[in-house]
Amino acid sequence: NTLGWRWVGGMQTIGKTYLARRDNIRKFTQNRFDPMGLATEAHPLASDGHPPRGAAPQSPCWSVGARVGVLLHDDDVNLKPLFESDISPVAFTRILTCVNRSPLAVSQSVADFASGATEDAINRWRDRLGEDGGLHQDTQAIADWAQNMKLDQVVTPYGATGPAKEMLDELEEWLSPKGIDLIRVINPYDSRAWPHATHGFFRFKEHIPSLLDAMAL
């Protein structure tokens, strides 16, 4: 599991550890690497248990006649579902959540990739996004921007977990007292995949071909 997705993402199985092993590295690199001095023990992940399974979230309805602003974040830059209605934003802004992925530091390459993906989405939809509100660093600044723009709603792609979800939860706490609704729009491919994410990767893997076919339509 060395450098596998669980190892890199820190998503260890509760009660298990995934140690880098010299023989494993040697085997799967065809003897190109033979590291010395690797750790021989690790403490298993402590947890209160897995969160309960639930149905895929549904996107709430928004009023197409209201003053709407769009919030882009790097967790999901597919804006097509936002514009499948008659939504006409008056402005947009953006935030990079990837900088909160680690309590230590995040690689500049990661930040540059996230920033580039976000800017690419803006360029694709610029004629529909309204006035550019720039890049903000925290949720209070976004709430102030929404209030200054006299918005009724802020529409944004759904953030399922991690820094993006935490940021959106915090933003909702700032916006609600100002009478501004936060509308989180879940992408169709997430809705299709969500029901299959219940028993780990290998059961989910069986559905990947049909999920990819649906995305291609």
Image: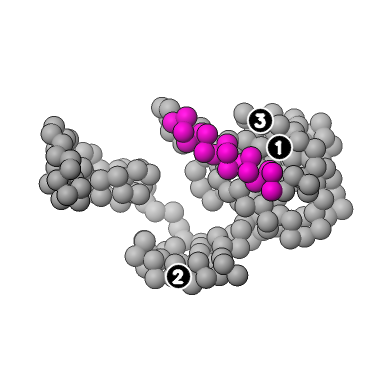
Magenta stretch: give its range. Answer: 107-124
- Left or right: where does residue 13 sit relative to residue 175? left
- Callout 1 touching callout 3 (CB < 8 Å): yes
**Element marked by disc 2:** helix
Q: Nearer the viewer, mark 3 or mark 2?
A: 2
Within 10 Å of disc 3 (Cα), the crowding (few <14, some 14-19, many 20+) is some
Q: Residue at x 34, y 43 (%)?
A: 8
Vertical arrangement, residue 148 with respect to residue 180, above or below: above
- Residue 117 painted magenta: yes
Please give the name of the residue rendered at 48% of the width and 72% of the height, measured from the top-left corner.
210
For residue 136, the mark is 3
Quadrant position of the C terminus in the picture = bottom right
Q: Which residue is mark 2?
A: 209
Give the residue type that dot 2 points to. Pro
Q: Type of residue at label 3?
A: His
Residue 113 percent location from the top left of the image: 52, 38
The image quadrant of residue 129 is: top right
Decide which of 29, 49 is in the foreground and name it.
29
Return the x and y of residue 81 as percentages of the image width and height.
Answer: 68, 58
Q: Earlier in the sequence, mark 1 or mark 3?
A: 1
